[in-house]
Image (tube, grey):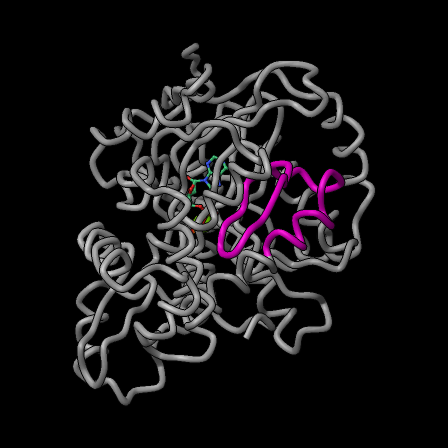
């Protein structure tokens, strides 16, 4: 089967044995993660080695080969042979100084999470890479429906990449082997995924977000969001969508959650409404900077709708609406739960993000801009 789920033309494939087939298919796609490219060649012994390195890294900066020998119970020559391949495939990094040791690399960690998802039947096939975020790599996949009712569900796998370490940096760390900052990414990424999954389970379905299905290590399986990113879409009824986004922010707030990275890049829009994504940095209203962070979230949204559509809303009043609610947002809620006829089109790249020229508008626009500059993105959070 091949079907389009989004305006961008996302293809989902399925069928017996398609799991491996898909991995072959994605070999041809550029920017593919090494783990997926070579995943088809990994067998249970390779996974035992990867798991052994993962376990060893709890105690060692570089897991000594002797330890790995003990853990995997593979004869040295076999272990040596397989390690060479894992290093070539960039799933594992190796050093000889001050002793023979290995570390797992992001792609090796991806392979472990994927293997777990497949075993648990969280996914049944994997497809193309559909996005690289600031701190993640996203692949489309499919999942068999529970109780075999209904068709396969299009999902995505979000691999967290917090504290992403480039291969260059790995080399640098290898050269300064005494440094302690090494590879905290395993823990940072895992924590971020756990945190995001936990909050998504709490918010779904009250807040409109993609349904969370599973989490392992640094990875989450969730439903494919409907529609397209707000940043890439030209809406025909922007007021309605703005109200809907604010309504979702209000529901989240009423459940004790502030997104803390809300912007046009973390919102999907479709004829069904909006879906908010990317939650790991969320905070609660008790956070010492909660008010500033909520203000930044709302300001991001108002700035977007002002620049692109010339819609002018007062920041303070809108924040109050989100915090305390008003008649207007309650009414909007009743209406919007009925759904909406489609009112947008995906930008073809020719849409310029400009607001109208004019005294009042310009003033408010530049005020919001100043606010944006004063507060940088993904700043304080209680994640750390
Ligand atoms: N559930 C989803 N459905 C479809 N695309 C998604 C989904 N989640 C993320 N993406 C895509 O991947 C990108 C990065 O994901 P995001 O959760 O925003 O992580 P980051 O912290 O890296 O920005 C998004 O901008 C979007 O294009
Ligand atoms: Mg994002």
Report the front residue among 108 and 224: 108
| Residue drawn at (75%, 27%) of the image | 337
Pick the residue in front: 50 or 347.
50
Q: Position of residue 310 (x, y in %)?
A: 46, 39
Give the image location of residue 160, x and y in percent. Answer: 44, 55
Q: Which residues are magenta?
A: 196-221
**Residue at image coords 28%, 29%:** 26
> Does the stretch in magenta take in 349?
no
Could you tell me residue 224's position as x and y percent? 52, 31
- Is 155 drawn above or below residue 194 in the view shown? above
Can see residue 359?
no
Number of dots carrying numbers: 0
Question: In the rendered view, would you say 5 is above or below 139?
Answer: above
Position of 21 with respect to 173 (left or right) is: right
Image side of residue 25 versus residue 188, left or right: left
The residue positioned 45% from the left and 27% from the top of the image is 125
Q: Quadrant of the C terminus?
A: bottom right
Q: Quadrant of the N terminus?
A: top left
* Magenta residue check for 211: yes
Q: Is residue 333 above or below residue 91?
A: above
Asked if residue 245 shows in the view, the reply is yes
| Residue situated furthest front in the rendering | 75
78, above or below 29, in the image: below
Look at 76% across and 34% down and name the residue there: 333
Q: Position of residue 240 (x, y in %)?
A: 62, 30
């Amino acid at each position: 089967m091949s079907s389009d789920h989004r305006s961008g033309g996302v293809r989902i494939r399925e069928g017996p044995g398609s799991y491996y087939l898909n991995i072959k298919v994605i070999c041809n796609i550029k920017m593919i993660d090494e783990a997926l490219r070579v995943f088809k060649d990994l067998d249970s012994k390779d996974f035992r080695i990867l798991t052994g390195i993962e376990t060893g890294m709890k105690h060692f900066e570089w897991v000594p080969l002797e330890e790995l020998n003990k853990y995997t119970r593979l004869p040295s020559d076999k272990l040596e042979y397989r390690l060479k391949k894992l290093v070539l495939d960039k799933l594992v990094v190796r050093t000889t100084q001050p002793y023979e040791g290995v570390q797992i690399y992001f792609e090796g960690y991806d392979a472990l999470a994927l293997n777990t998802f497949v075993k648990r039947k969280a996914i049944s096939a994997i497809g193309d890479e559909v996005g690289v975020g600031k701190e993640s790599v996203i692949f489309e996949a499919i999942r068999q429906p529970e109780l075999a009712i209904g068709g396969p569900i299009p999902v995505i796998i979000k691999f967290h990449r917090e504290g992403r370490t480039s291969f260059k940096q790995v080399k640098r760390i290898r050269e300064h082997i005494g440094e302690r900052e090494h590879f905290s990414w395993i823990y940072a990424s895992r924590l971020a995924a756990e945190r995001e999954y936990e909050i998504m389970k709490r918010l779904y379905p009250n807040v409109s977000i993609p349904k969370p299905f599973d989490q392992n290590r640094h990875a989450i399986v969730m439903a494919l969001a409907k529609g397209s990113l707000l940043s890439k879409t030209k809406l025909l009824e922007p007021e309605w969508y703005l109200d809907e986004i604010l309504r979702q922010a209000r529901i989240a707030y009423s459940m004790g959650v502030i997104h803390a990275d809300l912007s046009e890049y973390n919102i999907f829009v479709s004829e069904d409404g909006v879906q908010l994504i990317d939650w790991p940095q969320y905070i609660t209203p008790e956070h010492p900077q909660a008010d500033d962070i909520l203000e930044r979230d709302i300001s991001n949204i108002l700035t977007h709708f002002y620049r692109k559509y010339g819609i002018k809303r007062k920041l303070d009043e809108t924040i109050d609406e989100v915090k305390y609610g008003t008649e207007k947002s309650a009414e909007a809620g009743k209406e919007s739960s009925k759904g909406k006829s489609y009112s947008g089109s995906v930008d073809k790249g020719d849409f310029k993000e400009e607001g109208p020229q004019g005294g009042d508008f310009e003033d408010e626009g530049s005020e919001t801009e100043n606010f944006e500059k004063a507060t940088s993105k993904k700043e304080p959070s209680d994640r750390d």
